[in-house]
Amino acid sequence: MEKLARPVIAGNWKMHKTISEARHLAADIVSQAASLSQASLILIPPFTAIQEVKKTVSGSHLLVGGQDLFWEEEGAFTGEISARQLKEAGCDVVIVGHSERRQYFGETDETVKKKVLAALRHELRPIVCIGENLEERKSGETLKKIKSQLENGLFGLPAEDFSQVILAYEPIWAIGTGQNATPEQAEEVHSYIRQLIDVNYGQELAACAIILYGGSVKPANAFSLIKEKDIDGFLVGGASLQAESFMGIVSEACRADEG
Ligand code: PGA
C-alpha cells in the first residue's frame, strides 16, 4: 500500500449526504484541494455514495474510504459489506471500530481485529478508532483503556500488518459535542500510544505510525492540535460535511507543517 504523507486528514461523513449531495461536496473539496497537495486527504462517504465520490475525485490526490466492513469474504450476511466490495467501489481506506459502532452496534476489540485482518487481505488501509468515555477519563482510566484496546484489538498482528494501520485517538466525550480534547490532553494519549507501539514493534515502526486525533476538530482548533509532536492528522466528523470547514482544517494543518 502507498505510503501516506503527513498530515493525514480524513472526513467521516457518517450517515449524511445522498449521492448527489456527496458529489457536490466532493467536487467542492477537490477544487480547493489542489493547492494543498502536501496533505493526504481521505473522504469517507456512506456506502451508497462511494462510487460517485470516487468518480468525482479521480485525477486528484484524494483517497476514498468506507465507514465499516464485515470480516467474511462473502455470504448470507444481510446488510453487511465486504472488503472486496469496498475495494472495487474505489476505497483505499476503511474505518474500523468507530466508537459509534462500538456503542450502538456491538463492535468489540475482537471484531475490530477480524475486520482489520479482512481489510488488509484486500489492501484496504484500516483507520482503527480507540478512546475513552467520560467516566473513564474522570476516574483516571484513560491510558488503561487505550492500552487494553490496543492489546486486544491490534498488538497481536505481525509487524508488517500493523505497519499498514492508521490509528485514531477519539475520546468519546469529545465526539460531536463541540468540546475537543485540549492539545495537552490529546498529546498525552498520542505519545503514550507511540510508546506502546515502540515497546511492541520497535522504534522505527513507532516513528512511522500515523496517529490521528478525532473529536470536535474544527478550523479554530486544528492548528494548536497538529502542533503537538505526536498528532499526525485528524479524523473529522461534523466539520467535514462542508467544504469550507473541512478545507479550513486542512489548511491549518498544512500551515503548522510549514512553520
Ligand atoms: P466530530 O466526529 O468531528 O463530529 O466530533 C469525529 C468522529 O466521530 O470521527
Image: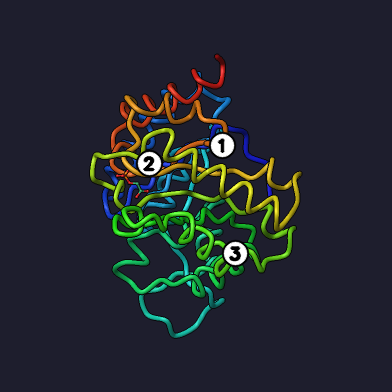
Q: Nearer the viewer, mark 1 or mark 2?
A: 1
The crowding category of the residue bearing disc 1, from other C-alpha atoms within 10 Å (few below 14, some 14 to 19, many at least 20), is many
Disc 2 + disc 3, Cβ < 8 Å: no
Label 3 element class: loop
Badge 2 amino acid: Val
> Where is residue 58 drawn, in percent x and y?
52, 38
Alpha carbons under labels 2 and 3: distance apart: 22 Å
Which is nearer the eye, 114 or 103?
A: 103
Ligand 1 within 8 Å, label 1 CB:
no
Ligand 1 within 8 Å, label 2 CB:
yes
Q: Nearer the viewer, mark 2 or mark 3?
A: 3
Q: Residue shown at 46%/43% (left/top)?
A: 55
- Please tell me whether residue 72 is drawn above or below residue 89 in the rendered image: below
Residue 230 is labelled as: 1
Residue on which disc 2 sits = 236
Alpha carbons under labels 3 and 1: distance apart: 19 Å
Q: Residue shown at 51%/30% (left/top)?
A: 228
Residue at the bottom extreme, as displayed: 76
Residue at the top extreme, as displayed: 259
Residue at the front extreme, as displayed: 139
Q: Residue shown at 28%/44% (left/top)?
A: 20
Residue on which disc 3 sits = 154
Label 1 element class: loop
Which is nearer the eye, 28 or 143?
A: 143
The crowding category of the residue bearing disc 2, from other C-alpha atoms within 10 Å (few below 14, some 14 to 19, many at least 20), is many
Q: Earlier in the sequence, mark 2 or mark 3?
A: 3
Label 2 element class: strand
Badge 3 amino acid: Leu
